[in-house]
Amino acid sequence: MANINIFSGQWIDMVFEGRNKLYGAYALRKENPKTTVLALIAGSIFFSLAIAAPIIISSLPKGEVAEEQVKEVELAEIVEPPKEEEPLPPPPPPVEEVYQAPKSVVDEVKFKPLEAAKKEEVPEDPPKIEQFKEADPSSRNKEADPNMGDIVIGKPAGDLDKGVEAPDVTVYNSAGLQVQPEYPGGIEAFYKYVNKNFRIPELDNDMTAKIYVSFVVEKDGTLTAIKVLRDPGFGLGKEAERVLKSLKTKWSPGIQNGKPVRAQYNLPITINIRS
């Protein structure tokens, strides 16, 4: 088998031995060397022509191009017969404008004829200021008493010109005030008072608890609206509320626009409990 040439037909006969050689595959394999040779020859010829074509074309003589004769074709002008113009309709007759003078206000507005009213229907003249100089403005029907005092007409009485300013009861946030409320001696003195008066409950375990409280510092420095915002339990919140209510020392109130105002104050109280 090693001496068989693949370009000869022996390997094809060996492959198709005992098989149907009338099948198309046998014919294709048989004619494959011939087809391959023809394809190589045709490809070589086509490749040679492609390379030699520019050389052949450049060696050919250049011929003169014959000029084509241009024939003039006269086109007959198609002239359409003129259409008959339809007569225009006659213009409308002129309208004569009649000038009318504008009506006067008297003609436009017609007044009712005046009728004389009866004397009983005519109202009396309104009273004058001179008539009230000696009058009593009370509901009593009594003659004026010279000892009752002077009656002033046309002038304001009392302090109405000075005006009365309504008291400011708004509760401001202490953080936004021009001057914040402050405990005498500072916040450290306040915490010192709380720790001194705070009754710590007895517990089995050591712990550190934080109680968040809120209160309003009034204009006079007293504390109102005392609330516990966060209570850790074990009665610590109620005890913190009791300590704040027992405080007798007044705070310095918050100041806004140069005047004392009510200010809300929030702060945490830390309690260390040891068993």
Image: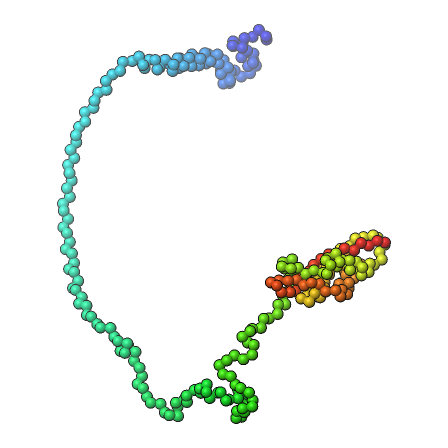
Residue at the spot 30% in from the left edge and 85% down from the top edge = 113
Which is nearer the eye, 22 or 144? 144
Left or right: 59, with 175 as reference point: left
- Residue 151, x across and y down, in percent: 52, 85
Q: Is residue 74 left or right of residue 32?
A: left
Going 21% across and 72% down the picture, which residue do you hit?
100
Tell me what residue is drawn at x 48 percent, y 14 percent: 32
The mark total stands at 0
Q: In the image, is residue 3 above or below residue 105?
A: above
Q: Nearer the viewer, residue 224 or 29?
A: 224
Q: Residue at x 15, y 36 (%)?
A: 76
Residue 152, compared with residue 205, is above or below; it is below
Q: Which image quarter: residue 178?
A: bottom right
Residue 258 location (% of width, % of height): 61, 63
- On screen, residue 129 above or below 240: below
Q: Is residue 212 visible?
A: no
Residue 72 visible in image: yes
Residue 140 shown left or right of residue 246 in the figure: left
Quadrant location of residue 179? bottom right
Towards the viewer: 270 or 162: 162
Way the structure is coloured: rainbow
Name the quarter where the N terminus is drawn.
Answer: top right
Give the x, y percent position of residue 136: 53, 88
Where residue 157 appears, as percent x and y from the top left, is 54, 80
Q: Quadrant of the C terminus?
A: bottom right
215 shown above or below 28: below
Please name whichever residue, 228 or 82, is drawn nearer the observer in this view of the structure: 228
Does 184 sit left or right of 120 as displayed? Answer: right
